[in-house]
Amino acid sequence: MHHEGYLRSAARSTLRPIAIKGEGENIESLTSYVGRLAWHHSVKPSLLIGSLLDPGKSPGFLNHEIATSFNSLTPKTVTIIESISTRAGLAHHLVAAMTFVHLYDQIDHSARGFIRKNKQWCPVCYHDDRSNGGQYDRLAWSLQGVSHCVKHRCKLRDYCQHCLKAQPYLSTKCEIGFCHHCEQSLSESALSKRSDADCKESEVYSSLVLGIFDQTLVAEESLESVLRQIAYMFSAEGIPRFAEFLKMDRHCVECWMTGETKPTLKSVQRVFGKLKVPWADVVMKRVSASEIIESNKRSRSKIQWARREPDPERGLRVVDGELLYDDQPCARKVRSVAAIERIDRYLDRIISGKVMPHSRAKIAALLGVSSGYLESMFGRKVKIISEIYKKHLDVLSVVRSERLKDEIYVSLQMVYEDGEAPTWSNVGAYLSKDLHKRFSMAEMARIRKEAIPDVFSGKYQESVQRAKRKVGLVQ
């Protein structure tokens, strides 16, 4: 029955659904469900995926690429969820619960460093599953940051204890719980229990599983909204001071807060680690922005960030001849922050239309900085200004062309009244000398060529009269 026609026949266009195993932090991963679904239909997982769920996927070892597509939060994961939901007749939210797609609007969609390259498992969980209706892989096991089983307090295995080889996420030879290479059971292993400290990081990462997500604690703010509110906790300017506090690129932080890009999981850990807030609770919306601000306002309020009271116990340092405390900025840094704020205000005035746009090189020269500095610090705003400047040049070009066309129409009328041929020498004799300075010969020749056919049309006289009124030859 392992042939392609079995899947493509009309009678098998819809798969027979099977029950999802586990709940909460022990919910099944989507790769595990697809593997069990394939063997339930007596078909290899590679054939089921390549023929129905993800057409064109090559057969063979179903390793890291499959886990990144099925268990993660990439755009491909969304497509796979729709496909499985349609083919297996399951509700969309049930299939999505076996992935991390609920974090799609929170962190970077590429999910770099999010999913492990090789499969890992808990032998004790596999042993318990054998007596409870079948073995399956937990969603939390596919996370890069999970290295211990939260339930049994033991380290997860990532190689077969018989042949010592790593395992693919889905095997093309045997069902879940057995080695792809030697087909021996993966549940036969003696493991020692670890301390709570060893399992702490795994518990934090495991809390990202949707199954243990308490819907009553959902906050309405997105991650970018939370970051924006926290940034303005520091000062009225917000983003420059917040980026300085995080020791990160200002443009990068600004893109997070506007929703232009999403932070990676590593960046989220760094930001909320500096704020001493559990990053997993923020990502899963178990903590609101107001609670984060409340917990940090004593040590990092707007007043304290701008000016702190002298403390004799704080350490002193010397910078550029200034005697400063360890957390006090030097005059050079204060001037630098003031310059950034001044440039930011000037760029905002250009965007709002209060100042005429210029090229980025001219703006940089006016502000006394380099073009590279502008692009690195204010990349998004410089891009917007470049588009505004391009539209401004297009409008100027149209106005210039219209003015030149008006003058050439008048010259053609004079040549026409004199009974002469509309050659370039005859038309050019009636043009002002100033016109030759403001327009190139190519521009004037092009407009003349476009205007000559109008001499023999009925619309010509009307165009000439309008042109003469513009240049003041007639009332």
Image (cartoon, rainbow, N blue to C red):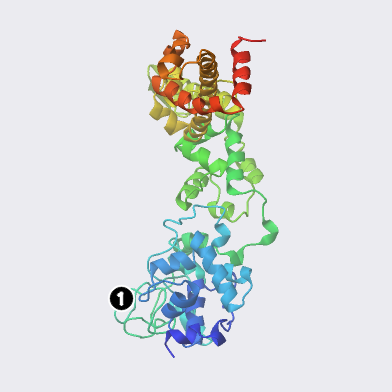
Residue closer to the observer: 84 or 157: 84
Residue 259, x across and y down, in percent: 56, 44
The residue sitting at the bottom extreme is 1
Mark 1: amino acid:
Lys
Report if residue 360 is visible in the image.
yes
Total marks placed: 1
Q: Which residue is at the front of the view, 124 or 116?
A: 116
Which of the 4 quarters of the picture holds residue 444? top left
Residue at the image position 43 percent from the left and 74 percent from the top: 121
Residue 117 position in % (x across, y down): 38, 65
Report x, y in % for residue 94: 61, 71
Return the x and y of residue 471 as percentages of the image width and height.
59, 12
Few, some or many C-alpha atoms within 10 Å of disc 1 (few <14, some 14-19, many ≥20)?
some
Tell me the residue at 48%/11% (across/down).
430
Pointer 1 residue:
165
In the rendered structure, the answer to whether residue 128 lies left or right of residue 170 reads right
Which one is in front, 395 or 470? 470
Under circle 1, the secondary element is loop
Q: Does residue 25 appear in this view?
A: no
Tell me the quarter of the picture where residue 231 sits.
top right
Q: Quadrant of the C terminus?
A: top right
